[in-house]
Structures are given as C-alpha cells and as structure tokens.
Image (cartoon, grey):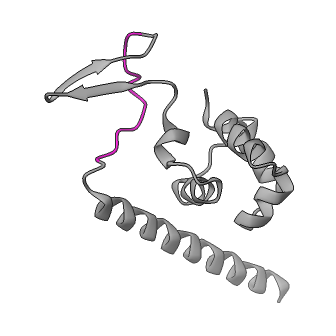
Amino acid sequence: MKIGSKVRKHREAKGWSQDDLAFRLDVTQGTISNIESDKSIPNSLLLNRIAKELEVDINELLNEGIQVNISNNQFSDLSSAGTINQYNPVYNMQSPEITESILKNQEQIADLIEAQSKLIEALLKK
C-alpha cells in the first residue's frame, strides 16, 4: 500500500474529511487530495506532521508492505515479494536525535522558503 492510501485509510478511520486534515496541517485540501491519490509525495516535514495528526508512526506510512523480522541479529524478510525494496528508506530507530535534527533542518528550510517567497512577492509588487 502506498503512502497516499495509508494517509486516506487513517484519515477516514478518524472520520475526518480531506478538508479537516488540511485545516489541521495548515495546507490546502488539494494538497491532501494530491497526496492521497499519489500525485505528490509529501516532504519529510509534512509527512511527520501528517503522522502526528493521524497518531500513527511515520514508519507505518513509509513502509510499503515489507515486514522485516529481526531476531538474534538476523534479518528475515516476511514480505510476499521475497525481497526488500532497495528504494525503501531504512531508519535507525536507535538514533532519534538524528531524526529530530533532520526534522528541525526541514522546518528551517521551509521557513527560509516561505521568507524567500514573501520577499519575492514584495519585490514583484513594487
């Protein structure tokens, strides 16, 4: 199942409309629609906010049906495909500091882009 389908499933489980989720995330309903229809993939900052609003682990939204069992330091693939998708991201769950740092950097980038957009708008109005 793709990210969009998972977002839709969790949103509907809460009884929310796309407008409800969009309002909570301060984005447009079209943004939610594009994510749910897999026309766009949310950046890491937005994906983290979506996971928090829907009260799900971000890895649940990212994982495309691949389940890995770890026991005695041995990995065994439990997916029906029999192989782990090489493009599926791997996260070190023992390092939440790195994840937090990345998310803070993403927030700073988003703030810079917003400030840049406002500056450009102001310049165009002159």
State whether the magenta stretch is mostly helix, strand or loop.
loop
Q: Residue 89's spot in the image, x, y percent? A: 40, 38
Compared across the picture, whether 20 is left or right of 41 comes to right
Quarter holding residue 112: bottom right
Compared across the picture, whether 67 is left or right of 93 comes to right
Compared across the picture, whether 108 is left or right of 8 comes to left
Residue 118 or residue 64, whichever sits in front: 64
Residue segment shown in magenta:
82-92
Q: Residue at x 63, y 81 (%)?
A: 115
Quarter containing the C terminus: bottom right
Q: Is residue 85 magenta?
A: yes
Residue 118 or residue 45, whichever sits in front: 45
Q: How many marks?
A: 0
Q: Residue at x 77, y 52 (%)?
A: 31
Quarter containing the N terminus: top right
Q: Residue 71's spot in the image, x, y percent? A: 20, 27
Compared across the picture, whether 114 is left or right of 59 comes to right
Q: Is residue 27 above or below residue 62?
A: below
Quarter holding residue 69: top left
Residue 45 or residue 49, whichever sits in front: 49
Quarter holding residue 91: top left
Q: Residue 46's spot in the image, x, y percent? A: 60, 58
The outermost residue toward the left is 72
Q: Is residue 13 magenta?
A: no
Q: Is residue 45 above or below residue 68?
A: below
